[in-house]
Image (cartoon, helix red, strand yellow):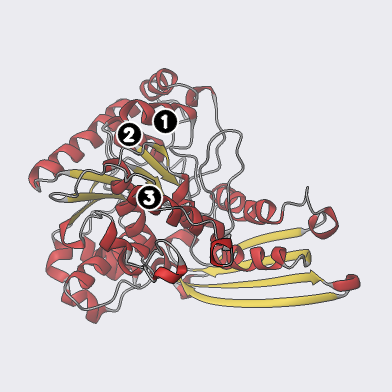
Amino acid sequence: MPVPVDIAPARGKLGVLLVGLGAVSTTTIAGVLAIRKGFAKPIGSLTQMGTVRLGKRTEGRSPKISEILPLASLDDLVFGAWDIFSEDSYAAARTAGVIEPSLLEKVRPELEQIRPWSAVFDQRYVKRLEGPNVKQGANKKVLADALGDDIRRFAQEHNLDRLVMVWCGSTEVFMTESAAHQTVESFERALEANDPAIPSSMVYAYAAIREGIPYANAAPNLSADIPALVELAARTKTPLAGKDLKTGQTLLKTILAPGLKARLLGVDGWYSTNILGNRDGEVLDDPESFKTKEESKKSVLDYIFQPQLYPDLYAHLCHVVRINYYPPRGDNKEGWDNIDLVGWLGYPMQIKVNFLCRDSILAAPIVLDVALFLDLAKRANMHGIQEWLSFYFKSPVHAPGLYPEHDLFIQLMKLKNTLRYLKGEELITHLGREYYD
């Protein structure tokens, strides 16, 4: 019989550190405050509304996840943030324009108390943004130390017991691993040398991991997914997750593509285009930032379809991804997909998808879930890459030598089996023979 994992209780307050106080962060914060006060429901959140089946189907045991595992309560969350603009969380939420003003007014006093600390920011990595609320320092090591000071002061002021950090900042320019990223020592030398191979997100990741604070990357840029920071996480026993939240168009791809592959329908082409008008759209209007996002979005189909195993069906797939900055839309993204299918005897078919989504509304429950699950992982002594959280990400980080799992339904099975493992319950294989033997 499996044995439950020893998980430290979720006593006291959990500090949620958000890098960037834009649309995603303010929607998350305002949403949690509204849910706490009973003004709204936590729709889209697995930690708040999800259930997990335990035992056989005939047993009828499907409790809520929050009832069987010691997750932090929403009442115990305290939010802090960094941003290049100094406006408070209420003003930032009004600027983002995601949540209706009438709902924001109901949580306005609490939002106004959350003012961002000055950010570590370098325009070389996010070329379309600039703001005045930026830290100055002799080198990136000094800036990382300043972030550590912010974290410790925040924890002391709010009497926090634990912390997690989620990068909700903009997509940085495309980068690949370099010599600076290989070991903790080479990384720290690069910090002191102001090496351009260390973007702002890595400075934040280093500051968190050094303190043993769980870190997640909600953007597609290279961040904690380098050997040096994975090594540091092993030393400090820090859980890591990422990267790039699976929200609009890619969410639909990871739902549709597994179904098409399951029925062995061929796909000749998949054309995806988006229009988006928020700050994310503005940043992605820069070709170097777009390349980072494009790599994240395009890899999904390659891994799901496995053309090396099914060359007749997917070897010649033409996959095109476009993102167009269109300010009138704001945070309301529109994604069009055209899928050219091949069926029995080679007969062509098509699927057209038009997804009018709200990017930050889809992202906010993911930020909440990832923060709570990372805190659970830390208390369960599960450090390093948390592949069971790949359910939430477009480009799941993974161990060297593995390919990332992108199939949403396999990802959910991995997540729920991890919860069963933590609870000391039998893992569910869905074999089903026990009902008939």
- The answer for how far apart the CA atoms under marks 2 and 1 are is 7 Å
- The answer for how far apart the CA atoms under marks 3 and 2 are is 27 Å
**Side of 250 where 368 appears, left or right:** left
Q: Amino acid at mark 2?
A: Ile
Q: Secondary structure at mark 2?
A: helix
Q: In the rendering, which numbered label is found on residue 229?
A: 1
Q: Of label 2 and label 1, which has the lower sequence position? A: 2
- Residue position for label 3: 130
- The answer for how far apart the CA atoms under marks 1 and 3 are is 27 Å
Q: Of label 1 and label 3, which has the lower sequence position? A: 3
- Residue at position x 31%, y 43% from top? 5
Q: Of label 3 and label 2, which has the lower sequence position? A: 3
Q: Secondary structure at mark 1?
A: helix
Q: Quadrant of the C terminus?
A: bottom right
Q: Amino acid at mark 1?
A: Leu
**Side of 242 where 107 appears, left or right:** left
Q: Residues within 10 Å of mark 1 (few under 14, many from 20)?
A: many
Q: Secondary structure at mark 3?
A: loop
Look at the numbered discs 2 and 1 and tell me whether their residues touch, using CB distance below 8 Å. Answer: yes
Q: In the rendering, which numbered label is found on residue 21?
A: none
